[in-house]
Image (cartoon, coloured by chain):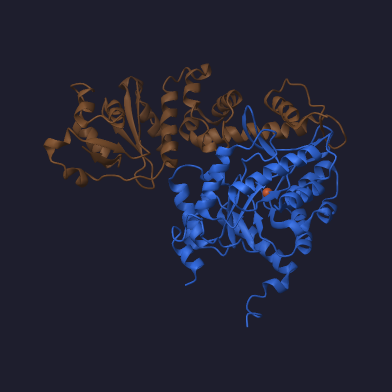
Amino acid sequence: MPTLAETQARFVAALRNRDTAPLPLVLGRDGEIPALRFDVYRNNVHVSLVNAIAAAYPTVERLVGPDFFRGMARVFVGEALPQTPVLLDYGAGFPAFIERFSPASTLPYLADVARIDWAWHRAYHAAEGQSLTPRDLSAVPAEHLGGARFTLHPSVQALASPWPSLSIWRTNRHDDEVRSVNLRAGGEETLVSRPGHEVGVWHLPNGGSRFLHRLLAGETLSDAAGATGAEFDLVTTLQTLLTSGAIAHYRF
Amino acid sequence: MTAQAEARRDPTRGVGPSGARAEPPIPASAGVGLKPAHYRDILEARPPVGWFEVHPENYMGAGGPPHRYLEAVRERYPLSLHGVGLSIGGAQPLDTAHLERLAALVRRYQPGLFSEHLAWSTHTTGFLNDLLPLPYNESTLAHVARHVSQVQECLGRTMLLENPATYLRFQDSSIAETEFLEELASRTGCGLLLDVNNAYVSAVNHGFDAADYLDRFPMEFVQEIHVAGHVRRLDDLDQPLLIDSHDTPVPDPVWILLERALKQCGPQPVLVEWDSDIPEWAVLMGQAERAQHTLERCHPAAYRHHANAC
Ligand SMILES: [Fe+2]
């Protein structure tokens, strides 16, 4: 009699690979090798995991259509099972997978659109945190502001893309009829934050995501701004951070 | 105000180092699986449902709207946690990180019941997200019993174990499922969750009589019942193949089995499970009403609320 571990290893091999020989261990109703019955399990595993990917990437699904999406997600699921039973955490590797999924290579911005979906999904489930208002920050004398260091809200994520990925994401996520986006319009940077109950997505000035990552690393405001170059629009960036509730605390 | 009522009004109150907030037990009435699509309906209309059940895995994010809604529902209704990820029948050791996540949710939401499945879903290659079948024999029994005891120790409470819906049997199964569950409950002190839809699905798939299965089921350990819908297909040999899909109203044969079960195990919490193609709230409420009527018809004395109050 095989051990439980052997039985389960064999079961999984057949679940994951259609070419794996039928399991002599498993019987249906009359002792036959019941291919269709085994397919119920195969189907449950893969359909439910594709559904989990679809739940996290609704904008990608709309953009490419459900058939292409499910085909693509099925290949992803075939490559990488979730490593924990917490499906909220499953699918972090999907944007990188899209980048090397050749049938999607005609949509070079698709992976970056997927990254915005994933940031939205993570922000939705992120820990609670405080958000400073513009009034809170106005208490800091202007001459001291440059020396301030910031803690950001746990939901905050910043993304940079060489494509107008945010415009593409927005129209596919929100518009009844998807508008066309000029792909030559240049790159876009995106801020995702969930100050209260609702996830918000904001456009960041160029260099904003680099600036934010430096703030996250603990640099002062002036050091972080200095490192992004002369054309960096610090005022608009700070305004965006405040409106989006991205700043939780400051200290000196 | 009683301590319990006060604790319910303010969920943070009374939670000491001993985790002493008293949870309301799950009443012997109809409950419904809580779905995000219905959060608002439920919080606005406060429907007369006895209790709600959730899959704890859906509340394992750090924060955000899911927790806000669940907190709000939990303040108003008793709550049961029904795990789908523990892989209690897995050959490998239990995932202690997952057990810790469950323990944290149990401390936070103080559920009236915690249940899991007699199945496995995790392998060294990863999590398969389905409730896979087990061979029922002595060695599996000893193994699953150890896992159940470990869960109960970690959570500091008894758990319920649910009978699965299966499409296949194993050649090396030597113990009947009902006997296997009975043995598990006696060895570990766990309770049982009787899913009458699963019983029906397995009965049709394996060609046995579902009523007979219920008659053999160790009813003295049952503390919760599930009803749900399934779909009907044919397998390669044109034999009926029922799939436990949880995406339809509870079909008549399952309602009939519910009555039979209730007559044997007394009034119990009865949950309506509906997990995909989620309908509007009114449809689920209708199913819950039917479950409640079934309870009251089977046990009229237990539900004569006011007549016997003085
Ligand atoms: Fe169930």
Left or right: B284, with B19 as reference point: right
Residue A184 is situated, as x and y percent measured from the top left of the image, at: 33, 19
Residue A193 is situated, as x and y percent measured from the top left of the image, at: 35, 39
Residue A40 appears in which quarter of the rendering?
top right
Q: Which residue is drawn at 45% across and 41% down?
A: A125
Q: Nearer the viewer, residue B150 or A237?
A: B150
Residue A113 appears in which quarter of the rendering?
top left
Colour of chain A in the rendered structure image: brown
Residue A12 in sight:
yes
Residue B92 is situated, as x and y percent measured from the top left of the image, at: 67, 33
Left or right: B101, with A163 as reference point: right
Extreme-bottom residue of the structure: B310
Residue B44 is situated, as x and y percent measured from the top left of the image, at: 47, 60
Q: Which of A159 and B138 is in front in this view?
A: B138
Q: In this view, does A72 lie above or below A252?
A: above
Colour of chain B in the rendered structure image: blue
Q: Is residue B30 above or below residue B185?
A: below
Residue B137 in sight:
no
Q: Is residue B48 above or below residue B240?
A: below
